[in-house]
């Protein structure tokens, strides 16, 4: 990433400006280090290959598996943070709000329902798929941000979604 950017500017470019982040961090310069780039690459690959960013047609997939895939991102992110250490603070500033503000509301809504058998009902399956579709644009924006942070070509739109 050439040049100097404020964190706020990058969130706007990635379609993530609705995240609630302390103004101190929003106005700070965004300067990813090697540890940030490594962490971003690891999570980029995870997101790029999950239902979190891929179209889920009505007659395809499984709602419980999709929910598990969303939830697994918390553990994956924790592991990535452990591996890359305290030097990936720019990555943390982006990843934690996405986990807590985009993914967590969906997982906390659906895990109790899953335990009660909600996915045995078509209406619940449709509602979950609607919730997933609602957050996917933000998750694709997050994926694009991770590609930029890791300084790799963004492949989020590699496959034709038509």
Image: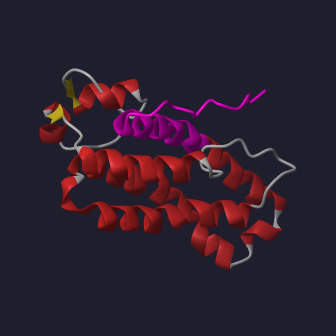
Find the residue positioned furthest to the top: 3
Give the number of marks. Answer: 0
Q: Is residue 135 magenta?
A: yes
Q: Taking 115 as reference, is 88 left or right?
A: left
Q: Is residue 11 magenta?
A: no
Q: Position of residue 102 (x, y in %)?
A: 45, 50
| Whether residue 93 is visible | no
The residue at the point 51 percent across, 31 percent down is 154
Q: Position of residue 146 (x, y in %)?
A: 41, 40
Judging from the image, the colouring scheme is: secondary structure
Picture quadrant where residue 80 is located: bottom left
Picture quadrant where residue 116 is located: bottom right
Q: Taking 5 as reference, is 99 left or right?
A: right
Looking at the figure, which quarter contains the C terminus? top right
The residue at the point 53 percent across, 65 percent down is 71
Picture quadrant where residue 22 is located: top left
Looking at the figure, which quarter contains the N terminus? top left
Q: Taking 6 as reference, is 16 left or right?
A: right
Out of 35 and 26, give the one closest to the viewer. 35
In this rendering, is residue 42 above or below 15?
A: below
The residue at the point 26 percent across, 22 percent down is 2
Out of 140 and 59, give the one closest to the viewer. 140
Out of 126 and 95, give the one closest to the viewer. 95
The residue at the point 38 percent across, 47 percent down is 40
Q: Taking 54 as reference, is 144 left or right?
A: left
Q: Position of residue 93 (x, y in %)?
A: 26, 48
The part of the chain drawn in magenta is 134-162
Find the residue positioned furthest to the right: 59
Q: Position of residue 101 (x, y in %)?
A: 40, 51
| Whether residue 156 is visible | yes
């Amino acid at each position: 990433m050439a040049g100097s950017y404020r964190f706020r500017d990058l969130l706007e470019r990635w379609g993530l400006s609705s995240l609630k982040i302390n103004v101190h961090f929003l106005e700070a310069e965004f300067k990813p280090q090697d540890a940030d780039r490594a962490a971003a690459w690891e999570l980029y690959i995870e997101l790029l290959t999950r239902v979190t960013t891929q179209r889920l047609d009505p007659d395809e997939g499984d709602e419980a598996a999709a929910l598990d895939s969303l939830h697994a991102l918390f553990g994956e992110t924790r592991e990535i943070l452990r591996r890359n250490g305290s030097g990936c603070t720019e990555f943390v500033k982006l990843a934690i709000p996405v986990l807590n503000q985009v993914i967590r509301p969906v997982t906390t809504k659906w895990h109790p329902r899953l335990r009660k058998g909600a996915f045995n009902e078509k209406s619940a399956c449709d509602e979950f798929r609607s919730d997933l579709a609602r957050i996917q644009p933000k998750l694709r924006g997050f994926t694009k941000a991770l590609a930029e942070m890791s300084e790799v070509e963004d492949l989020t739109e590699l496959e034709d979604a038509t």
